[in-house]
Image: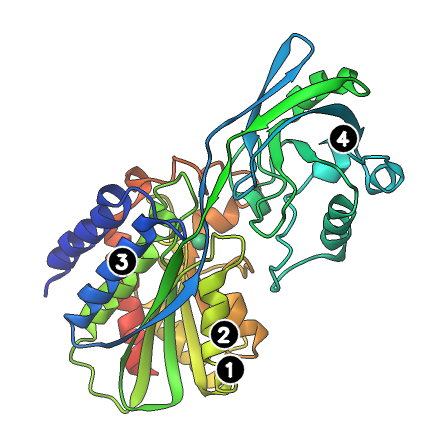
């Protein structure tokens, strides 16, 4: 098939994932439609497939209101938070020390300033969880507070480009929470000691989801795994994050449809990179328990195909022969260059298990990690995708897989 035909193919996949399917967040119906579509499509190229199921809640925003005296404040339910309908005294804390001393029992607590500078990692997120975050979460859970209001600014590294960002995004955290802009928090502070009314219609919905694993080649003892997460953040089309990655997986599957090698190639649509409990990733780890050393190499795609700048690759623990080979292959493709290492992707899972990994993304995102306002917002739509880069990335990966 020609490059132009693959471009058409890529456009169709992207349209399906970002437009026809309205959302792909884990636990939602759209997410299940996306994995079903992926499974059907990749099987049609002769790949053996396996579905790896897990339970995962979905979430309905429902909106929230906060009234203090005669003033109404704009607040948003924390994603995956429980709802509430409360009238209680307001108290506040801006540091861990203040939170430790706070008498929060039965109160609504405003968190602002230093303590809300970055998004708290979810309780059960095992891959990266600083002690400082764990300490704050434990203090919040043991505080006796009825609900939390977090006043936040920007935190691109952990929360993407959203302002304000939710301090708590965790379906395992059972005290209701809402969030508001830092400047609104300053206006709310004078109401400390007074009764405020907080209502949130946030709701958890039981659901499930799947990883899709597709294989070719009989010998799994030194397999090449190609991964991309298929889920998207709630409320975003998730074009660059990560419909392009999923599209690249499908294009690679088609480019390698005649693959006859002994070495097993495994293509995995992981499900949960942008979800608090990363259930698909945890499931994949459980399924590969004791056999991770069979993975010769992971190639993970996340954030590729941005219309501006090059596609960037980065290497993690690659043996010398593979890194030399990979560099030669990848550098041969126009618009693909060596980029910086970055930890916020599923390649980190393989790295943590001591397996070599290559990450593929758009250089623009790693260059602008701290200041971009695209990731996890509505701006992450098809207008910022260049399908030619998507096809080139797929060609490069296919070439790499057959050359290693
Ligand atoms: Zn992503």
* Name of the residue lying farthest toward the right: 101
Does the numbered disc 1 mark a residue whose Cβ is under 8 Å from ligand 1?
A: no
Task: Specify whether 206 is left or right of 167.
Answer: left
Residue in the foreground of this view, choosing between 264 and 359: 264
* Disc 1 from disc 4: Cα separation: 44 Å
Q: Residues within 10 Å of mark 1 (few under 14, many from 20)?
A: few
Q: Are marks 3 and 2 in contact (CB under 8 Å)?
A: no
Residue that badge 1 annotates: 289
Whether the residues at callouts 2 and 1 have beta carbons within 8 Å, the answer is yes
Using the rendered image of the protein, determine whether residue 80 is visible from the camera's viewpoint: yes
- The crowd level at tag 2 (other Cα within 10 Å; few <14, some 14-19, many 20+) is some
Q: Are marks 3 and 4 in contact (CB under 8 Å)?
A: no
Towards the viewer: 91 or 199: 199
Report the residue marked by disc 2: 285
Q: Residue furthest top?
A: 70
Depth check, mark 3 against mark 2: the one in front is 2
Residue under numbered circle 3:
247
Marks 3 and 1, Cα distance to the nearest angstrom? 28 Å
Q: Residues within 10 Å of mark 3 (few under 14, many from 20)?
A: many
């Amino acid at each position: 098939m020609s490059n132009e035909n693959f471009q058409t193919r890529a456009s169709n996949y992207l349209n399906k994932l970002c437009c026809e399917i309205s959302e792909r967040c884990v636990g939602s119906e759209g997410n299940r439609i996306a994995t079903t579509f992926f499974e059907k499509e990749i099987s049609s190229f002769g790949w053996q497939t396996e579905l790896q199921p897990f339970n995962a809640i979905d979430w309905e925003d429902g909106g929230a209101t906060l009234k203090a005296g005669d003033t109404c404040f704009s607040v948003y339910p924390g994603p995956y938070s429980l709802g509430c309908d409360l009238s209680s005294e307001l108290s506040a804390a801006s540091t861990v020390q203040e939170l430790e001393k706070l008498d929060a029992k039965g109160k609504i607590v405003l968190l602002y300033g230093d303590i809300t500078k970055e998004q708290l990692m979810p309780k059960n997120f095992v891959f990266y969880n600083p002690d400082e975050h764990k300490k704050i979460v434990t203090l919040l859970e043991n505080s006796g507070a009825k609900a939390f209001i977090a006043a936040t600014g920007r935190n691109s590294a952990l929360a993407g480009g959203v302002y304000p960002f939710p301090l708590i995004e965790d379906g395992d955290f059972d005290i209701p929470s809402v969030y508001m802009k830092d400047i609104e928090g300053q206006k709310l502070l004078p109401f400390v000691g007074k009764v405020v009314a907080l209502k949130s219609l946030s709701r958890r919905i039981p659901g499930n989801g799947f990883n899709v694993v597709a294989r070719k080649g009989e010998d799994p003892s030194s397999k090449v795994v190609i991964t991309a997460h298929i889920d998207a953040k709630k409320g975003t089309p998730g074009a660059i994050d990560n419909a392009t990655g999923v599209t690249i997986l499908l294009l690679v599957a088609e480019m390698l449809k005649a693959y006859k090698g002994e070495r097993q190639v495994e293509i995995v649509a992981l499900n949960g990179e942008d979800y608090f409990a990363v259930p698909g990733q945890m499931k994949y780890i459980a399924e590969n328990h004791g056999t991770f050393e069979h993975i010769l190499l992971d190639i993970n795609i996340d954030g590729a195909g941005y219309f501006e700048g090059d596609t960037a690759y980065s290497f993690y623990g690659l043996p010398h022969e593979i890194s030399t080979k990979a560099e030669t292959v990848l550098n041969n493709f126009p618009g693909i260059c060596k980029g910086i290492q970055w930890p916020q992707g599923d390649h980190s899972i393989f790295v943590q298990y001591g397996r070599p990994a290559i990450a593929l993304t758009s250089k623009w995102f790693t260059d602008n990690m701290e200041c971009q306002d695209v990731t996890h917002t509505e701006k992450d739509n098809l207008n910022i995708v260049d399908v030619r880069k998507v096809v080139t990335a797929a060609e490069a990966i296919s070439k790499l897989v057959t050359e290693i």
